[in-house]
């Protein structure tokens, strides 16, 4: 079995978090030839009589797939006990897409929907007296021992560092204004100062709606050339989260059986209707909601607990928080959606260190009883053409035969690491969908192709006897359904 060697020595944590377990990419010339062969294979159906039936029937897809095997030294065990999920469709397309920026017309629709006539102001560059006083209350409580010391920086538990911060805040309080200085912000795209890309444009500012903070921004090619992002947040922001470019909502640690507060009566269907209506108003098409789940916003910073993306709360712990639904959307063609994973496609191979990554398209809304309180649309695609509406795909039996070798090659580093005593790779779901691969030598054009994603977990026991379980929301392995090649989701090809 061919095993791909990693060129760099990496730590166990870095390997899991940043996808270093994936095989190193081949040269652009080789990748280009592979893509040409893949497209030739995908187009074979246009010359052949298409068999009747669903994709599942045509490809011979079973409901489940089980298998188990291990490496030669027995160090890594692979267990496959997976449900197979394939959408109800009779054909899978290949669609060429490219990067695009938001137009002024789109910006106008977003501003009209989310802000209406509310004035937009530039982001304040200083805190008000009230904001500083509120922060000082927490810091004083840390100093007198009411709550644990938790400050910014590596010395987050340092009393000395806490006293320095208190002194700086007390000095700032003497010079602070009672209310923020409000400078009107433009609702038209402007070139940001110091932008590296001459095509960079932004609309950005803050507002207030129903006595609630509002943050709004659209970035075209800023701060990176390939960064295109629209963001709207309306939230009663808690200390430390004002205008931090992310909605202060967090998931539940018990999403399967949450204890929902009686006063939160919004249903998932109602939230979906609101979100769908917003997308229709904004003119965003070809999107399907793939996930809708509860999120909560703390009504204060949790004592002694830092807040970060991905943090969760138990529903019982969050019963007094502000509740809402997060809805995740993705493109869908022939009833086959782009599969959502946590990989954002922002990885760059060593030989492409000067290239700009092109992140995957991402669309998320948060809806509460008042309506849409958060909207994120990142890296929108422009559809160039449908290469084929009915790609020729490998029978599932062939995918099944390839899977052991591909997963073993992707995780060969587990057996090779001196820090790992044993490892178990489990696959619990194999899902059919679309993903975007970048075309060779281009960082702004690619193909939506059908793939099989394998989801599961990796359990590792290190030399100290510590066992750790990593459940990845990004796929453990992504297999091109046309030619059986492995796709590195972090790199986008």
Image (spheres, grey):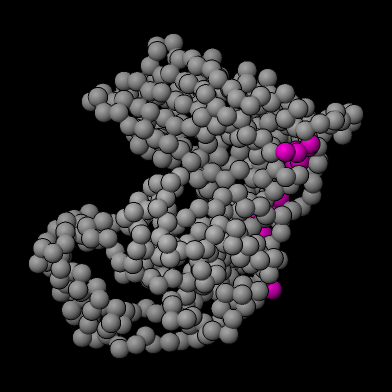
Q: Report whether residue 189 is seen.
A: no
Residue at x 52%, y 34% (from the top left corner): 455
Residue 307 position, x and y percent, is: 33, 57
Does 51 sit above or below residue 173? above
Query: Which quarter of the rendering shows the C terminus?
Result: top right
Does 61 sit above or below residue 226? above
Residue 434 position, x and y percent, is: 66, 41
- The one nearer the camera, 339 or 44, is 339
Q: Report whether residue 8 is seen.
A: yes
Residue at x 72%, y 23% (from the top left corner): 60
Tell me: 160 left or right of 400: left
Q: How many marks?
A: 0
- The one nearer the camera, 47 or 266, is 266
Tell me: 92 left or right of 251: right
Residue at the outermost top position: 72
Does 407 sit above or below residue 170? above
- The one nearer the camera, 268 or 213, is 268
Assess whether residue 131 is covered by the magenta stretch.
no
Tell me: 411 left or right of 430: left
Residue at x 65%, y 32% (from the top left corner): 480
Residue at the outermost front position: 262
Residue 387 position, x and y percent, is: 80, 43
Residue 305 position, x and y percent, is: 26, 56
Tell me: 423 left or right of 166: right
Assess whether residue 90 is covered by the magenta stretch.
yes
Bounds of the magenta segment: 88-105
Residue at x 50%, y 45% (from the top left corner): 342
Query: Which quarter of the rendering shows the N terminus?
Result: top right
Quadrant assignment, res 440: top right
């Amino acid at each position: 079995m061919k095993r791909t060697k990693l060129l760099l020595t990496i730590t166990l944590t870095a390997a899991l978090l940043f996808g270093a377990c994936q095989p190193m990419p081949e040269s652009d010339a080789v990748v280009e030839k592979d893509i040409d062969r893949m497209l030739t294979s995908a187009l074979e159906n246009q010359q052949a009589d298409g068999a009747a039936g669903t994709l599942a029937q045509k490809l011979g897809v079973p409901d489940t797939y089980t298998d188990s095997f291990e490496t030669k030294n027995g160090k890594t065990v692979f267990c496959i006990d997976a449900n197979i999920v394939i959408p109800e469709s009779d054909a899978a397309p290949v669609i060429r897409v490219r990067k695009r920026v938001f137009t002024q017309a789109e910006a106008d629709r977003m501003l009209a929907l989310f802000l209406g006539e509310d004035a937009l102001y530039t982001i304040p560059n200083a805190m008000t007296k009230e904001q500083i006083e509120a922060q000082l209350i927490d810091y004083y409580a840390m100093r007198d021992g009411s709550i644990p010391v938790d400050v910014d920086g590596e010395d987050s538990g340092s009393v000395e560092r806490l006293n320095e911060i208190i002194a700086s805040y007390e000095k700032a309080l003497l010079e602070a204004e009672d209310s923020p200085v409000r400078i009107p912000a433009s609702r038209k795209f402007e070139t940001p100062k110091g932008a590296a890309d001459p095509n960079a444009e932004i609309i950005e500012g803050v507002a207030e709606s129903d006595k609630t903070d509002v943050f709004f921004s659209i970035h075209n090619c800023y701060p990176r050339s390939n960064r295109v992002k629209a963001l709207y947040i309306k939230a009663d922001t808690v200390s430390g989260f004002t205008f931090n470019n992310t909605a202060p909502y967090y998931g539940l640690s018990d999403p399967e059986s949450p204890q929902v507060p009686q006063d939160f009566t919004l249903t998932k269907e109602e939230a979906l209707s609101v979100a769908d209506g917003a997308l229709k108003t904004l003119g965003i098409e070809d999107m399907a909601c793939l996930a809708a789940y509860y999120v909560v916003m703390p009504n204060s910073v949790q004592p002694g607990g830092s807040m970060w993306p991905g943090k969760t709360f138990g529903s019982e712990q969050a019963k007094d928080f502000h509740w809402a639904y997060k809805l995740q959307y993705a493109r869908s063609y022939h009833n086959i959606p782009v599969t959502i994973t946590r990989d954002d496609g922002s990885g760059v191979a060593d030989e492409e260190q000067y290239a700009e990554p092109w992140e995957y398209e991402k669309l998320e809304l948060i809806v509460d009883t008042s309506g849409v309180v958060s909207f994120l649309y990142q890296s929108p695609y422009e559809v160039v053409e449908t290469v084929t509406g009915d790609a020729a795909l490998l029978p599932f039996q062939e995918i099944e035969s390839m899977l052991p070798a591909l997963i073993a090659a992707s995780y060969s580093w587990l057996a090779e690491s001196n820090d790992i005593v044993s490892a178990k790779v489990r696959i619990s779901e194999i899902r059919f969908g679309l993903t975007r691969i970048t075309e060779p030598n281009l960082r702004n054009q690619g193909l939506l192709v059908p793939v099989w994603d394998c989801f599961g977990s990796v359990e590792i026991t290190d030399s100290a006897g510590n066992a750790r379980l990593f459940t990845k929301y990004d796929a453990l392995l992504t297999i091109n359904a046309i030619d059986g090649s492995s796709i590195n989701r972090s790199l986008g090809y």
